Image (spheres, rainbow, N blue to C red):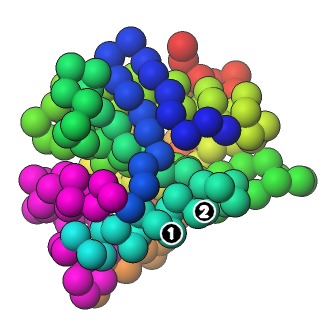
Amino acid sequence: MLFEYETQRLLLKIIKPEYGSSVLEFYLRDKALFERYEPDRMPGFYTTDYQKKALYIEFNKAIEGTMFRFYVYEKTDPNTIIGTICFFNILHAPCYCCEVGYKFSSRIHHRGYATEALTVLANTVFTELNMHRIVACVEPNNAPSIHLLERVGFVREGLCRDHTCQHGIWIDHLQYSLLPADLRQ
């Protein structure tokens, strides 16, 4: 799997620790939005040092082939992160499946960037990693995320009760999956 891809409008890159301040800026721009749907942050998360350490770990996991987090940039502004898509829990034989998670800056919502990036990267995971199935879990009240998954071709499978502990409360999630034949090009 390559560490950089292009779409018509976007750059999708696995980045190194020196981009820690850019990642921190991305998280701070939409802190309230992201925290609404994610578990509590680790102490020090909102520091450049923490982000550099996280990028170091992510980069090494990509080299190992165990996790791939792509940062998304507009081609017209290749220095500002607008989103991230991560493929993790990668299982090979006999399952050939992985999970996906993503987040995008609120300032670029409703432009089709998330659909464009997720479609290209899902296709890449199917063709280059030989995955057969990609799973995504989403809160039932997160309508924008559900619409994104359905636009890409993900199919709702059911409810995962008490899936994730967020802010001290266990939250149900809907499980969606994508097979190669489901992917909308």
Circle number at residue 61:
2
* Mark 2: amino acid: Lys
Classify 7 as above or below 155: above
Query: Which quarter of the rendering shows the N terminus?
Result: top right
Task: Determine the residue positioned at 40% across, 22% down.
Answer: 116
Q: Please name the residue that numbered disc 1 is placed on.
A: 57
Indicate the quadrant where residue 10 lies. top left
Q: In this view, does 124 lie to the left or right of 136?
A: right
Classify 123 as above or below 53: above
Instruction: Reply yes or no: does residue 130 show up in magenta.
Output: no
Q: In this view, does 183 lie to the left or right of 45?
A: right
Classify mark 2: helix, strand or loop: helix
Nearest the camera: 83 or 101? Answer: 83
Residue 73, how many percent across, how many down? 29, 33
Query: Which quarter of the rendering shows the C terminus?
Result: top right
* Contact, mark 2 vs mark 1 (Cβ under 8 Å): yes
Nearest the camera: 162 or 178? Answer: 178
